[in-house]
Amino acid sequence: GAGVSQTPSNKVTEKGKYVELRCDPISGHTALYWYRQSLGQGPEFLIYFQGTGAADDSGLPNDRFFAVRPEGSVSTLKIQRTERGDSAVYLCASSLAMGNSPLHFGNGTRLTVT
Amino acid sequence: AQSVTQLDSQVPVFEEAPVELRCNYSSSVSVYLFWYVQYPNQGLQLLLKYLSGSTLVESINGFEAEFNKSQTSFHLRKPSVHISDTAEYFCAVSGGSNYKLTFGKGTLLTVNP
């Protein structure tokens, strides 16, 4: 069966540009999460959606980062005015619901800001 | 707030040897504990988890981890590793919810023939 799909797998952009990263969760998963993994670090929580709404966006580093999930399925992470420090692997995960359901991660999008 | 410390960034072992990957956590609330594995060129996969009940949890591929509340540890062990176990292993903790995971920096396990 299809897992969590993230596109693109790699994205190179210039400092100051705008980027969008897409996540297709597993069909039927109501919960969706974004994490960021910098080089040599473990993943860090960014934002969590339950359905269409962002239930917890406390991990977004600043207001240049924004994420949407308008129909409760696909999500887009948007980064404005990118900085070199934004370079990282952005991971998306989905699960059936909160509670004990395991998180299923995608392969990530590697973002490089030059 | 929670934090996770994985004491070894790299662990090289020979095939069929036992291995222990260490994980310590800190938290002011009751926790759920997880081990995730990332094989080369693949996404993170849940290996095993402790939510409640028995402090010893096992995975389907022979790994086990024991929750030790007094030592705030959740070390991962396998009595005999295979080359296919080569991967990066991440310990993670959540403070009672399943979504806001705090991860350690990871331990790269390399199994040599």
Image: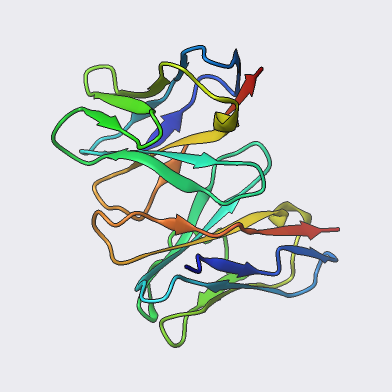
Whether A52 is drawn above or below B5: the answer is below
Residue under the point 47% across and 67% down: A1
In this orientation, which residue lies closer to the viewer: B26 or B83? B83
Q: Position of residue A88 (x, y in %)?
A: 68, 52
Q: Is residue B1 visible?
A: no
Residue under the point 70% across and 69% down: A8
Q: Position of residue A20 (x, y in %)?
A: 67, 75
Q: Position of residue A102 (x, y in %)?
A: 34, 54
In this orientation, which residue lies closer to the viewer: B72 or A15? B72
Q: Is residue A80 visible?
A: yes
Q: How is the image coloured?
A: rainbow
Is residue A92 rendered to the left or right of residue B2?
A: right
Residue farthest left in this picture: B53
Q: Position of residue A14 (x, y in %)?
A: 85, 66
Please identify the quarter of the rendering in which residue B69 is found: top left
Residue under the point 33% across and 26% down: B65
Q: How many marks?
A: 0
Q: Quadrant of the C terminus of chain B?
A: top right
Whether A22 is drawn above or below B85: the answer is below
Is residue A30 rendered to the left or right of residue A109?
A: left
Whether A46 is drawn above or below A81: the answer is above
In this orientation, which residue lies closer to the viewer: B56 or B51? B56
